[in-house]
Amino acid sequence: MLPVAYMAVFVFLFGAVIGSFLNVCIYRLPLDQSIISPGSRCMSCGAAVRWFDNIPIISWLVLRGRCRGCGAGFSIRYPLVELLTGCLLLLLFLRFSLSISFFIYSLLVVALIVVTFIDFDHQIIPDEISLSGVVLGFLASFFLPEPGWISSLAGIVVGWGSLALVFYAYLWLTGREGMGGGDAKLLAMLGAFLGWKAVPFIIFTSSLVGSVVGLSLMAAQRKGRHLAIPFGPYLAFGAVVYIFYGPQLINWYLHLGK
């Protein structure tokens, strides 16, 4: 059995490799392109990225964020996604060790990373992720210690229903679409993985953080209340917070003033 420190390093490095693949998914899924082939290429000159130029984080730093062939710049997002994925999987390992919870929550977290950046870029949440996630989350409930399949099923209904209600109520009142239908599907997926008790926590946390960010952006850009802000990234943030601290924070809140 490897020491915990060695395992932690391995998990981080493995997460960074997964993050490199997530960059491919983030770019290609909205364009309906294959995430398998062709391999990574420079968007400017079309040259294939060789394996030694595709080492997560390190290659970007060595090449100073540029293509070896033409010198075109590569976005700093690429190493940041790799670093973020490695760090989150490391935190999950430190929280759950190599348990079934670690593997299932790792699957959820990498899906949320893809959702976050696609929603930021295109303001869409691919059904390939959210609807597949609903099914996988429900199946995972039979293997996780919590929440159990009943809570998972209720989480799907409560997650989708709560945001769908907001979507149709806003549409009826204003004649315009506010929150997208993809957000409701994403919350259904989160309810499937985390159970119905997680849904109010995620809605509260995402609304709080999203409101702060949204008001700041509206003030900075002076676009008023019609500025379109993707909500998926904040739902993802609320879900990650719940995985690590949700039950403790809920328990703390319920015992305030006692």
Image (tube, grey):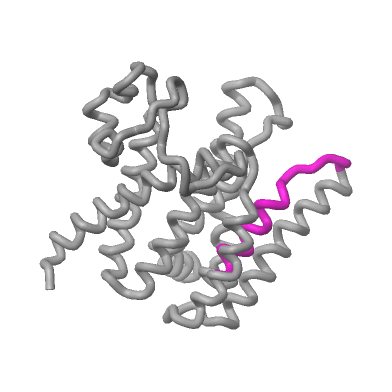
The answer to whether residue 227 is above or below residue 193 is above
Relative to 214, is 93 above or below?
A: below
Q: Which residue shows up at 33% across the image and 57% down it?
A: 89
| Residue 223 x/y as whole percent | 68, 23
Residue under the image location 28 percent in, 37 percent down: 57
Task: Give the dominant element type of the magenta stretch: helix, strand or loop.
Answer: helix
Residue toward you, 165 or 5: 5
Q: Which residues are magenta?
A: 174-192
Q: Is residue 81 above or below residue 200?
A: above
Against 2, residue 205 (above or below) is above
> Which image quarter: residue 93?
bottom left
> Most extreme residue toward the top, as rendered?
71
Nearer to us in this view, 238 or 232: 232
For the residue pair 233 and 162, the one nearer the viewer reads as 233
Residue 257 seen anywhere in this rendered image of the structure: no
Residue 233 rendering spot, x and y as whole percentages:
54, 46
Please name the residue shown 38% across and 21% down the image.
Answer: 73
Question: How far across and how far down the image is residue 236, in percent?
Answer: 52, 52
- Residue 45 among magenta residues: no
Quadrant assignment for the N terminus: bottom left
- Number of numbered discs on residues: 0
Q: In the rendering, at what x and y percent does residue 88 appear? A: 34, 53
The answer to which quarter of the image holds residue 65 is top left
